[in-house]
Image (cartoon, rainbow, N blue to C red):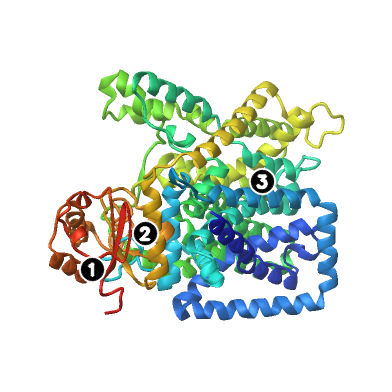
Amino acid sequence: MTAQLTSIGLALLIFPLIIWVPGMVLAYSTNLLEFRARPVPTQIAVGLLISMSCLPIVSYLMARVGGFRSVWVFYGIVWSVAAILLLRHGKQLSRAVRDLFANRRGTVVLIAICMIAGALFEMDWISSNGVRPNLCNMDATAHVATTDALTRTGVPPVNPFVYPGYPVHLLYYYAWYIMCSLVDQLGGTAVTARSAVQAGKIYIGLGIVALIVAYIEIAGSRLLPGVKRIRTGVAIALLTITGLDLIPWVFLRIVHRLTGKGPGLMLSLEWWNEQVTAWLGAILMSPHHPAGLIMCLTGLLLLLGIWIQPSRKWVLMGLASLAFASAAATSVYVTLAFAAGLFLWLGFAAMHGWWEDVFRICLVGVVAGVLYIPMAMELAAASRTAGFPIAFTIRAFEPVDYWLPSIIHSLKGSHLIYLLRLVFLPLNYFLELGFFAVAAVLYWRWRRSRGGPLAKEESLLACVGLGSVLVCTFLHSTIKWNDLGWRGFLVAQFVLLLWAVPVAQTYLERKEPNASAPTSILRWPLLVGFCLLIGLAGTVVEIYNMRSNFWGPVGPQTIATRDAYVWIDQHTPRDTVVLFNPDEDIEYFNALYGHRQAAVDGRIYAFNFGGVAENKTGVLDDALELFAKDESVDDVRKISDRYHVGAIVVLSSDPVWQDSASWVWKLHPAFTTDSSRVFVTAQAAGQ
């Protein structure tokens, strides 16, 4: 566990070199968004946002053309410029650091505590009872394997989950994980792909905070006119508030325990219904989607910056193009929902004759699209889907989709379900959004009372939020899960968070004579307080769920499994192909500890991540047979040769282990425990 914490800590120290220094250099050199006149926290936020948003696509394109060596040349130049600026302006930097620690000491300490807490949350609990990862490792397995594949095989990466005897394309939006791979590479053997991904989650959380700081400090008065002072601390605190999911989650768990009916085991608070994921849950479970949100909204902030600093419009437009291209290469679902809102605003702007703004956004979109073409072609080559990946729907609601048909049997399979979903849509969103739904109603009632037309910034923010809601309500993704409906809603959630700040301020300051928000904005204080309380309790419960629950193997056996894959990581070449029993949904330990190419990885990831269809290769059937029944030693060697396998892992839970006359007990293992065996083949041995 100490090694885990050390590796994450080193990754946390390396990340700023990759995703902060370049943005600071650019913003300071060009005085972008009036950078030099901004407070130090805003400068830090802007530097982080520009780097996180623009560098993924830049790194992707350079690595695609010249390999990672060209990326390191680029960073070498950036760091050299940073060193020169540091030497020339060291006194200003020293004053800024002193100011930060003198006047913002509490903020610095809070960030440090959050980083430590994040690192402790991400660690596996290891004891005599077994290895206990957290619930987020269901998704993190894919993120870590992708990052490791980038480090091992470059750009574009080889699919790490299946190797039918030859490398195949990976179907994944991996631009953010290029940044994690750079940290992995820079950290050498001291930093693993897993610790780079884990540290990356923490910086994505800081990126969301930076987004709030930048929006409020740079454009807050334009986005929320009429509010005397927008308190950044209140906005950041709202990240800990989720919807009213706790109420139906508790109710359904009780019903399931008493009657056995319902959606079954709900390890996460979000699993009771079609998700509108809590902020902390989204960052921890699926970090590249919040990263895509950061990129989209940073691009939008840069476009807003043209109205603030028109003299830098071409630089701002260029950076916005990079940010939008990075977003598309990181989370196509978030980008699609964001683009729908931007398209709505283009129509609104055209109706008002704002043709110059329309032209700028269209030009930025075209440039972003051109930058994204190489990855689009790469993903198209990896895709094996016959149908379109997006379809029309009306957002699902668990009481309508499960409970009503169980009571009224004629509703099963009926199209009337869609009408009922539409009827119950307000209740659906009220439960999922809670305080933020109430705050949006209160904010816009107050905004209407002020009168006057919407400013450009207000209308742009409203259209972006509305577009996200429309997309995530009436469209769904068809590949395995509805990631479009779950992740695309993050765009609307950020807009709702900004609108909620005046309401939260009014609630907190309602007894103060000099409140920073208009007191008339708050009409239902009891409802607001109730939603805030349940929303905060829901986040606490969800963090507990994520840390204490795990969907995968548990018990002492997992210690031997971990030891086997750690041995493989330390004693086999990096390009070794590992074969293990794929008769499970997800194999965690090879990705999290072994960091090797899998011959075939379980039933979920192997053929969902592109490259080859299950019916086009026999690797799954061959592997299943090998671990289910005895094969001759020659057959084992033939399978190893056919799929270029360098190491075979057999566990006591595999059926073939129980046969004392099987090949497991005829071959000599390179590593063994009471419940695991690792066999190194001629390929891994270099023979």
The number of numbered discs placed on residues in the rendered structure image is 3
Between label 1 and label 2, give the one nearer the viewer: 2
Who is closer to the viewer here, 517 or 621?
A: 621
Label placed on residue 458: 3
Label placed on residue 643: 1
Who is closer to the viewer here, 431 or 569?
A: 569
Q: Amino acid at mark 2?
A: Ala
- The reply to whether dot 1 and dot 2 touch (C-beta < 8 Å) is no
Q: Earlier in the sequence, mark 3 or mark 2?
A: 3
Label placed on residue 366: none
Label 1 neighbour load within 10 Å: few <14, some 14-19, many 20+: many
| Residue denoted by label 2 | 564
Q: Amino acid at mark 1?
A: Tyr
Q: Residue at x 45, y 57 (%)?
A: 143
User: Which secondary structure lies at badge 3?
Assistant: helix
Between label 1 and label 3, give the one nearer the viewer: 1
Label 2 neighbour load within 10 Å: few <14, some 14-19, many 20+: many
- The reply to whether dot 1 and dot 3 touch (C-beta < 8 Å) is no
> Quadrant of residue 142 in the image?
bottom left
Residue 254 x/y as whole percent:
43, 21
Q: Earlier in the sequence, mark 1 or mark 2?
A: 2
Q: Residue at x 38, y 26 (%)?
A: 400
Viewed as shown, does residue 170 lie left or right of 18? left
